[in-house]
Image (cartoon, rainbow, N blue to C red):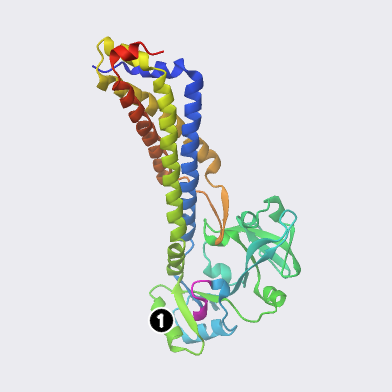
Amino acid sequence: MLLPWEYGVRNLARRPVRTTLTLVALATVVMLVFVVVGFIRGMEQSLSVSGDPDVVLVYSVNSEENIENSSIAARTPSLLTASLQGTVKRFGVTHVSPELYLGTRVKNESADGGLGLVRGVTLAAPLVRRSVKLTDGDWPGAGEVMVGRLAAAKLGSSDEAMAVGQTIEFEGRSWKIRGRFAAGGAAYESEIWCNLGDLQTATKRQDLSLAAMLLSPGSSAAEVKLFCKERTDLELRASRETDYYATLQQHYKPVRLLAWFVVALVSGAGVFAGLNMMYGAVAGRVREIATLQAIGFRRRAILVSLVQEAVLLAAAGSLFSGVIALTVLNGMAVRFTMGAFTLRIDSVAILIGCGVGLLLGVLGALPPALKALRLQVATSLKAV
């Protein structure tokens, strides 16, 4: 026969201080798990939504996978449009975006020399980067920029300092913020966009970093790759944009593995913390456990009751942490080498966080409960 369900619930209320401390400790461990898993999920989401399957990137073969190091001739976009027929063309405008992409120090009112990502573009950029949507202000003109919604997080500054009308400095010039844009969580959201000619003048460069081409339906990226392979004098390589960001995911795989290792370490530390707390809780209830055995309850029933108490605490702590994670952590911007992204507390993060919390309750209660139940009843009844 099992002990009544309400017996375990009432036991939690009989020791409010110990119950509260245990609840806070379990909630803290689960919150750390939420933070790390949210970081992993946010980075994966940012890279997965950044690529457009219809866009092909053409950049220098010597840059490997780092477009910031790429340098191609300014005439490359014209050569591509003249030699290839698979690019989208509407109203006489070919959907090819020449771009200059670099990392540089950006200063504003609240960030003195933060590392920002700047992309010089033309009016063809929104035709190719179809996920980019202007949310405030207007397209930048001469001496102006528009900033992604996560550019402030990348620079470590406030959103007010990156609002429309504010001024920032990079490459020895002052730039006025004309607009703000979003890109559905893509990596562009941590960038600063300005006029390509202005950026070339400021950096004293006439080359480009890449050319982005929007392919028409039925066209294949293989044609562009074949062209780049045949024109060895240009030293170009082509990659579908989705393949490029998939490669970046592989590049950051060690970081994700390290983060999962941190989850395991935090969970392990939580188990030991739970063991320590439960040992203390059970040690003060030796006489109670012996009395329950003396009046006829089996050890298995008492064990189930003790585990029930621990699981109730763990469930409450997981629920408390889950509410905070969804309301506070979800969508919080995080700086990273690739730019910035937001923590993502999705169903996977909730499942892992709450699963770890419940696991802490079970694993934390079993060893001390089994130890207490192995004691002789007569000896335990005399315990102080």
**129 above or below 308?**
below
User: Measured from the top left, where is residue 379 in percent x and y?
Assistant: 32, 14
> Given the image, on which type of amino acid does mark 1 rest?
Glu
Q: Is residue 104 magenta?
A: no
Residue at 43% across, 19% down: 12
User: Measured from the top left, where is residue 221 in percent x and y?
Assistant: 41, 76
Residue at 54% across, 59% down: 183
Residue at 68% across, 53% down: 157
State the image quarter where residue 134 is shown: bottom right
Q: How many labels does the image show?
A: 1
Label 1 packing within 10 angstroms: few (<14), some (14-19), many (20+): some
Can I make out residue 253 in this image? yes
**300 above or below 127?**
above
Front in this rendered view, residue 384 or 28: 384
Which stretch did the figure color magenta?
A: 60-66
> Which quadrant would the N terminus be assigned to in this image?
top left
Q: Is residue 65 magenta?
A: yes
User: Measured from the top left, where is residue 357 in percent x and y?
Assistant: 41, 36
State the image quarter where residue 126 is shown: bottom right
Q: Mark 1 points at which residue?
A: 223
Front in this rendered view, residue 206 or 90: 206
Front in this rendered view, residue 205 or 262: 262
Element at label 1: helix
User: Measured from the top left, where is residue 295 in percent x and y?
Assistant: 27, 9
> Which quadrant would the C terminus be assigned to in this image?
top left
Can I make out residue 132 in this image? no
